[in-house]
Amino acid sequence: MSLLTIEGVWKNFGDHSVLRGIDLEVRSHEVVSLIGASGSGKSTLLRCVNLLETVDDGAIHLDGQEITDPRVNVDDVRKRLGIVFQAFNLFPHMTVLDNVTLAPRRVHGVARAEAEERARELLDRFGLGGKAGSYPDQLSGGQQQRVAIVRALATRPKLILLDEVTSALDPLLVVEVLQVVRELKEAGMTMILATHEMGFCREISDTVCFLDGGVMLEKGPPEKIFTEPEHERTRDFLRAVLDSGRL
Amino acid sequence: MTGRPQPGDEGEGQPWVKSERQHERERTRRSRARRSTSIATASSILFVVLVVVLVTNAPGWPRVREAFFSPEWFVRALPDVASGFLLNIKIFLIAEPLILIVGVLVALARTVKAPAFFPVRALATLYTDIFRGVPTLLVIYLVGFGLPALRLQGIPTDLATLGIIGLTLSYGAYVAEVFRAGIESIHPSQVAAARSLGLSHGKTMRFVVLPQATRRVVPPLLNDFISLQKDTALVATLGLLEALRQAQIIATSKFNYTSYLVASLLFILLTIPMARFTDHLAARTRRRRA
C-alpha cells in the first residue's frame, strides 16, 4: 500500500491555478523527484502535502487517512512529516542543538536529556558533531542546510519533503548536502524532493515526475524520463537544462 | 569545514609580510584620524563657549540665574524633591512589569485567528485604539478620580495604585503596538518552519516568534520606558507628593524655581543608566554571536 496518495489536487492563488489536478502515489522507502521550471508547482505541491497550503480540490491521503479533511488536526499530520526548505529557515535565536530538539521536546514530549542524546547522534552522523552549541549564523550554508535536515529527522518522520534544498548553495556546498540525502536514501527514508539538480535526481530517484504549468505531464523511472521522454515539453525542458550545463 | 580561508590561516601559501605600501597606507590613515579628532575637539569647545556667552550675556540672565540656578535653593530643595522622587521610582518599577505583561498579552490576542477568540481580538484592537488616542493625563484623571467614585467593592482607593493603573492602561496600549510590530516583522518562513515541525500556533509564538520579536523591539521598548519614567510625574495631578509636586510646592511658596532644576536632574539621572543598560544588552548579544 502506498504511504502517500495525492488525487486530483488543485491549488489556486487568485485567478491563477498553480496545481491543476495532480495525481501521485508514493510507496514506503520510495524516492520521488519533482522536476520542472520555476513556477511549475513543485514547491506548492510539497507545501500542500504538509498542509502549509490548503488544497482547493482533490485529496491527499497519508497512511490511509485523508489529511485534506478540514476536521483533521494539522499538527498531528505534521508530526509525521518533515520538510526542509530552500532557505533553511533555521531558528536564528537558538543553538543548533535547540533547533533540533525543539519539536521532539515541545511537540512529542521527549525528555530533554533523551532528545539531546538523539540530536547529538544525528548531528554526529552528518558531520555536525562540533556544531551543537553554535548559532545558525555562525555556520556555512551547507552546514545550515544539514542542520535543517537533521531538525526534520529528529521527530522520526515517515516522509521527508525536500524543497530545492541545494538551490541557495554554492557548488561545493551542494555536494555535502546531496551526500546527506544519499545517506537518507540508503537508510530507507521515504522522500519527495523538488530539485533542479538533474544529475543527482537521476541517480537517486525511483520515480521522476515532470511538472509543467501545474500539470504532471510525465512520470516514470529516471532512465525513461531522462533518455526517452514521451512529451515534447519534457524534451524541451531537459534540453534547456542540458544547454545550461546542469546535467 | 567551510573551505573558506580564515584570517591568520596561512594554508599552503607563504605567510603574510606587510608590504611597504600597506605601511604607508596605515600611516596616512593614522594621521588623518588624528586630524579629525583635533577638529572635533576644537569645534566642540567653540560651540560650548558660544552658547555660554550667548546665554550669560542675555539681558535677563542675572534674574534667570537667581530663579533657576541658585546653589542655595538647590541644596534646600534637594531633600524634599529627592524623597518625592523615590515615589516616582517606585511607581515606575511597579508599572513597568505590568505594562510589559499587558503589552504582550494584548499583542498576542491580536494574532489569534481562531473564531472563538473573535471577541478577544476585537477587544484588544478597541483597547489599543482608545488608549493610544486618549492623553495619558486624562487617563490618569479618569482612573484616579472616576474609579473610586464608583464605590465598587475591591476597587483600590490608594492614589499611587490608581496612578499605576492609569499609567499601565495608557502605556500598555503603546507597548502592545510595539510588540505587534515586532511579531509582524518576523518572516513568515519562521512560522512555516515551526508549524511544519508540528508546533501549534501557541507554541510557535512562545518558542519561535516572541523570542525573536522581543529581541528586535528592545530599543523601542526602552524608549517607551524612558518616556514612562518621565510620565510618572503625571500622577502629581492626583495630589501625590512625588518629585514634580514637591518641586512645585517649593517653587510656588518660595518664588524660586531651582527646585524644578533639581527634579529635572533627578529624572535625567534615572534615564541615563537605562540608556547604558540598553547599550550593554546590545553589546552582550553581539558578543554571544561573535
Image (cartoon, rainbow, N blue to C red):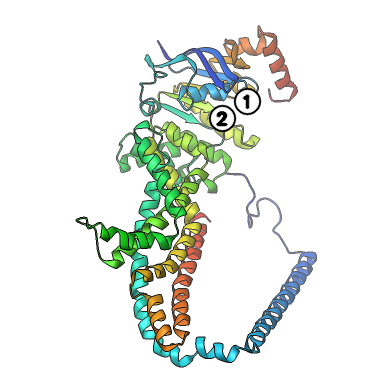
Question: Relative to A5, is B223 above or below?
Answer: below
Residue A119 can be seen in this image? no
The kind of residue tagged 2 is: Leu
Query: Which label's residue is closer to the chain start, 2 or 1?
Result: 2
User: Who's the residue at 47% across and 48% down the image?
Assistant: B213
For disc 1, the neighbor class at 10 Å (few under 14, some 14 to 19, many from 20) is: some
Question: Relative to B5, is B47 above or below?
Answer: below
Residue where numbered disc 2 is placed: A178
Q: Are marks 2 and 1 on the same chain?
A: yes
Residue where numbered disc 1 is placed: A197
- Between the residue at mark 2 and the residue at mark 1, the CA separation in whole angstroms equals 9 Å
- Residue furthest out toward the front: B149
> Would you say A229 lies left or right of A185 here?
right
**In the rendering, which numbered label is found on residue B215?**
none
Nearer the observer: mark 2 or 1; the answer is 1
Label 2 lies in what chain? A
| Secondary structure found at label 1 | loop
Q: Nearer the viewer, residue A80 or B72?
A: B72
Q: Nearer the viewer, residue A128 or B184?
A: B184
Label 1 lies in what chain? A
User: Who's the residue at 53% across and 19% down the image?
Assistant: A11
For the N terminus of chain B, the image quarter is top right
Location of residue B277 in the rendering, given as x and y in whole percent from the top left corner: 46, 66
Check contact, mark 2 vs mark 1: CB within 8 A: yes
Location of residue A92 in the rendering, given as x and y in whole percent from the top left corner: 49, 46
Residue A107 can be seen in this image? yes
Question: Relative to A194, is B26 above or below?
Answer: below
